[in-house]
Amino acid sequence: MDVGCGSNANATYSMLESGAGKVYAFDLDETIFETVPICLKDFEGKYVLSTDNVLTMQFNDNFFDFVHCAGVLHHTRDFFAGLKQLARVTKNGGTLFIMTYGKGGLVRDITSHLRNKYKQDEDFKSLIDNLNADIFIQLFEEIFTIMRNHNDSMWDKIPMEIIQSLFDEDLVLAIKDRITAPVYHEHSEEELVSFLTNCGFSKIERLTRYSGLKNIRRFLSPLYYKYDSQFAKLLYGSGTIHLKALK
């Protein structure tokens, strides 16, 4: 099962491509019916697409061999109720994979401040709502012009093509996700492992991977990968937590 499959159902695609016999994929947004069939055109008849909520899933207990839920639980109104549902539908002997946000770190402190500011400051809300990659380009063009007028040659050493690649629309989406999402729960790895253990899971393993990001976040990919380094902990605390657990 792919919980919160999103518009491109990339996890569903990966599971089917890897040989899964059948994948159930769902999300809250009905627009998935417009986009997902296009992404999964090579796998007709091998997936079931629906709208559903992780908190109220209608699937039977012990139904799935593998349950995938990435970037969903921390946006729900009841994090652990959702996690308990995922545990319920995972077969005995099956595997659960979750990705969620940890707690702590300077970046999360800043993000929390900006989320509050977004709720209280109409000017800031308007700025974030209307943010796009062109705004970054305009900003750097203005900065470079002032630098050039003051004989600071550094402006000429950074091609605008580089700026455009570092501040793209994918970065804008990441910023908006962090600031505008209505709910953003944060938990430590220890809390998650304890809860999963109480739900009957064992062999709980934290996974990591090097994210192939193309914008300015590519300079943070090493810290996402080595989440337990001193610099990663300073900035991100528990980091982004990927857990695989056997039931």
Image (cartoon, grey):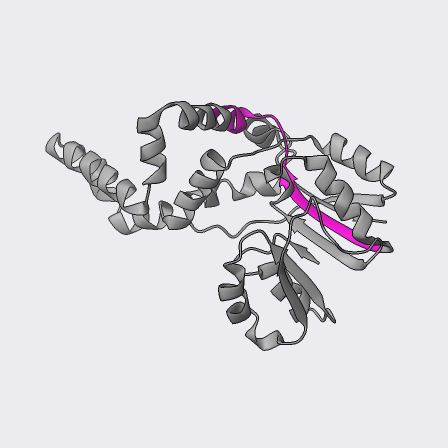
Left or right? Give the position of 168 relative to 148.
right
Q: Where is residue 209 in the image (x, y as percent from the top left)?
A: 62, 49
Q: Which residue is drawn at 49% across and 36% down?
A: 178
Percent of width and height locating residue 92: 88, 53
The residue sitting at 77% across, 41% down in the picture is: 84
Residue 245 painted magenta: no
Q: Does the magenta stretch include residue 95?
A: yes
Q: In this view, does 123 lie to the left or right of 50?
A: left
Quadrant of the rendered image containing residue 19: bottom right
* Residue 55 in sight here: yes
Residue sitting at 81 percent across and 39 percent down? 196
In this rendering, position of residue 167 left or right of residue 102: left
Specify whether residue 163 is in view. Answer: no
Q: Say how many tags the image has.
A: 0
Residue at image coords 73%, 36% = 80
Tell me where residue 145 sits by quadrant: top left
Residue range corresponding to the magenta coloring: 94-110
| Image location of residue 245, percent across then percent down | 79, 47
Q: Is residue 235 left or right of residue 14?
A: left
